[in-house]
Image: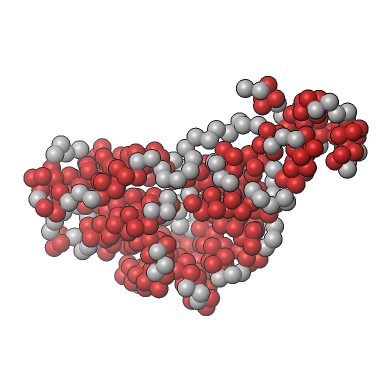
């Protein structure tokens, strides 16, 4: 390794200037800068925070821009499909529960341990540790299927109610988690299979159906079926909606409100401004009763979550300036930091896209880098993030660190 790679950027500039036998004055003249400016850069007093400036310096020094930034960020776990998705596909392709309980039983996992495993997987997901979750899912799905098949009430719709059998509830949650992860990774068709399995397993229990509808609506929207996503989400939401919101249990309100938000996101994707606003206002009313800082049914539903949805919907409706305004207003609130890391990072990707649409690559880059700091997996493994990086890396006004991130993720 070249010794210059462990130095700060300013020291690297000095190192390569020396290698090229250029005085500070000659180097400054070729850059069109003052000798004092060069001296401050090399001493670290002045920060190089623009891509265009780094490109100019690299051009004069006859080196690649990435050499100036070094290689501290390893290109590990980057690009393409997360390892293990095929094993998830195989797990979803099994029909042991359907063809007979004897084949499905295997070695049963105790219900309390299975519940802990599902909770652990959800926690990893909410920290955007997607490779870890992908590795957990095949065995988790198999165990949940065995537990479901071994529950004497799990296959009897007449017993379904608001207190679902443990085996069925855990299996629905496992399928729901699988669908949510696969949507993130851009595996829409496979996500649809997982969401459909969740819905089929949940049939007969209105709460489980509502929980399973959340990822189903995401899958339908991602596959271009926005109107179906909207009608499905609303049907599930209004089926569990309490007759009187005041005094209604927070978990039920959270699930209902999340489905209304999903309907609003679908309406925005369909270009329906009026319905989008009305649905988000309806969700906001529920969110005000729930408050921030909760995660009922793994929804993180509350006023901040609804306002972040306003960013995404404004972006889909072509109102990028409005999206930026909602982003800056919402992320200034303390409750913003109470959301799961995955939720915050996903929003920051939306914010980066919004800034790009308003012609502000500087803030777009900063939002993207903030997403990477918040939950690296959200940036390293989502196709959406890689598309934003690809746009930013060629913009001379983007933050210089974008080049380093693009190099680490092997994004051209």
Residue 249 is at least partly visible in this image: no
**250 left or right, relative to 387:** left
Residue at image location 22% in from the left, 43% down from the top: 142
Q: Position of residue 388 (x, y in %)?
A: 58, 53
The percent position of residue 375, horizontal first and vertical second, equals: 52, 43
Foreground residue among 49 and 275: 49
Closer to the camera, 300 or 403? 403
- For image coordinates 32% across by 39% down, the residue present is 136
- 379 in relation to 320, above or below: above
Q: Position of residue 164 (x, y in %)?
A: 22, 55
Residue 168 vertical position relative to residue 276 in the rendered view, above or below: above
Looking at the image, residue 343 sits to the left or right of residue 191; the answer is right
Whether residue 168 appears in this view of the structure is yes
Task: Please give the name of the residue rendered at 72% of the width and 34% of the height, measured from the top-left corner.
Answer: 63
Q: Quadrant of residue 199?
A: bottom left
User: Tag count in the figure?
Assistant: 0
Residue 42: image x %, image y %? Answer: 81, 30
């Amino acid at each position: 390794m070249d010794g210059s790679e462990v130095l700060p950027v300013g020291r690297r500039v000095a190192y390569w200037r020396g290698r090229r036998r250029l005085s500070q004055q000659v180097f400054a003249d070729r850059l069109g800068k003052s000798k004092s400016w060069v001296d401050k850069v090399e001493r670290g007093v002045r920060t190089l925070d623009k891509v265009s400036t780094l490109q100019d310096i690299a051009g004069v020094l006859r080196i690649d821009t990435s050499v100036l930034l070094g290689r501290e960020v390893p290109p590990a776990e980057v690009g393409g499909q997360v390892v293990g998705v095929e094993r998830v596909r195989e797990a979803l392709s099994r029909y042991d529960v359907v063809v007979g309980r004897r084949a499905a039983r295997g070695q049963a996992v105790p219900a309390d341990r299975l519940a802990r495993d599902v909770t652990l997987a959800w926690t990893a997901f909410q920290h955007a540790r997607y490779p870890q979750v992908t590795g957990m899912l095949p065995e988790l799905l198999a165990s949940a299927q065995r537990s479901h098949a071994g529950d004497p009430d799990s296959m009897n719709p007449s017993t379904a109610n608001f207190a679902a059998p443990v085996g069925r509830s855990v299996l629905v949650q496992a399928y729901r988690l699988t669908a949510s992860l696969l949507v993130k990774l851009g595996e829409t068709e496979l996500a649809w299979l997982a969401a459909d399995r969740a819905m089929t397993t949940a049939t007969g229990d209105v709460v489980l159906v509502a929980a399973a509808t959340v990822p189903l609506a995401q899958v339908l929207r991602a596959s271009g079926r926005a109107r179906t996503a909207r009608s499905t989400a609303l049907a599930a939401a209004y089926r569990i909606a309490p007759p009187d919101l005041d005094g209604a249990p927070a978990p039920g309100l959270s699930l209902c409100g999340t489905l209304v938000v999903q309907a609003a996101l679908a309406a925005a994707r369909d270009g329906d401004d009026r319905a989008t606003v009305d649905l988000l206002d309806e969700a906001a009313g529920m969110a005000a009763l729930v408050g921030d800082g909760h995660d009922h049914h793994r929804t993180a539903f509350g006023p901040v979550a609804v306002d972040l949805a306003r960013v995404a919907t404004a972006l889909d409706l072509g109102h990028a300036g409005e999206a930026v305004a909602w982003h800056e207003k919402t992320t200034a609130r303390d409750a913003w930091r109470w959301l799961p890391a995955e939720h915050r990072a996903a929003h920051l990707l939306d914010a980066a896209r919004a800034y790009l649409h308003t012609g502000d690559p500087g803030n777009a880059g900063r939002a993207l880098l903030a997403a990477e700091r918040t939950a690296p997996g959200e940036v390293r493994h989502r196709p959406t993030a890689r598309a934003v990086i690809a746009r930013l890396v060629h913009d001379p006004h983007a933050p210089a660190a974008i080049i380093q991130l693009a190099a680490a993720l092997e994004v051209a």
